Image (spheres, rainbow, N blue to C red):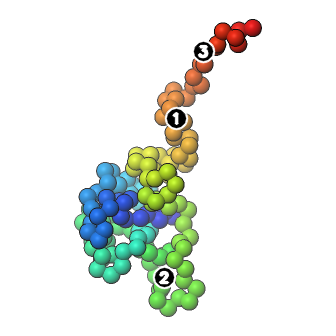
Amino acid sequence: MTIAVDFDGTIVRHRYPAIGEEIPFAVQTLKMLAEERHQLILWTVREGELLDAAIEWCRERGLEFYAINRDFPEEDVTRNESFTRKLKVDMWIDDRNVGGLPDWGTIYRIIHEGKTYEQILSEEMDPLGQQQKRKRRWWEVF
């Protein structure tokens, strides 16, 4: 699976243009996904020195990306007339999605187990996978 991952607000807390502290388990989860052969693309608004600082921050923690702000590493965005900023990926991990950013454990389960967010929430509400027995009201007896 090819996964685009935002940096500010997703891997680290928002402190742009500075780099905020790591969001718990972000780097560890992304490294696990990379080890499982998912292609991770860093997708960020950062450019120039700010982008270089984010890449170096990730590298210092052992996190390498398949590509950065492009579909594949060899893509020449300066000479490609058909280049579009919209990536061709299977999934986006971004704090700006509807509903906000789930915790990284949930993100891992969605990808690793191939479940939807709705399925995981349902399981968490009913951990035994059983329907809750509803108490019958007195008027439903008849």
Q: How many marks?
A: 3
Label 3 vs label 2, nearer the camera: 3
Q: Nearer the viewer, residue 75 or 8?
A: 8
Label 1: few (<14), some (14–19) or many (≥20) C-alpha neighbours in 10 Å: few
Question: Residue, x 56% and y 43% (percent of image)?
Answer: 118
| Residue under pointer 3 | 135
For marks 3 and 1, give the CA distance: 21 Å
Q: Is residue 37 visible?
A: no
| Residue under pointer 2 | 75
Assign a secondary structure to mark 2.
Answer: loop
The image position of residue 7, as x and y in percent, is 37, 65
The image position of residue 31, as x and y in percent, is 36, 58
- The reply to whether callout 3 and callout 1 are in contact (CB within 8 Å) is no
Kind of residue indicated by mark 2: Glu
Q: Is residue 98 above or below residue 133?
A: below
Task: Give the mark nearer the N terminus: 2 vs 1.
Answer: 2
Label 3: few (<14), some (14–19) or many (≥20) C-alpha neighbours in 10 Å: few
Q: Nearer the viewer, residue 65 or 122?
A: 122
Question: Residue, x 44% and y 75% (percent of image)?
Answer: 69
| Residue under pointer 1 | 123
Task: Give the mark nearer the N terminus: 3 vs 1.
Answer: 1
Label 2: few (<14), some (14–19) or many (≥20) C-alpha neighbours in 10 Å: few
Kind of residue indicated by mark 1: Glu
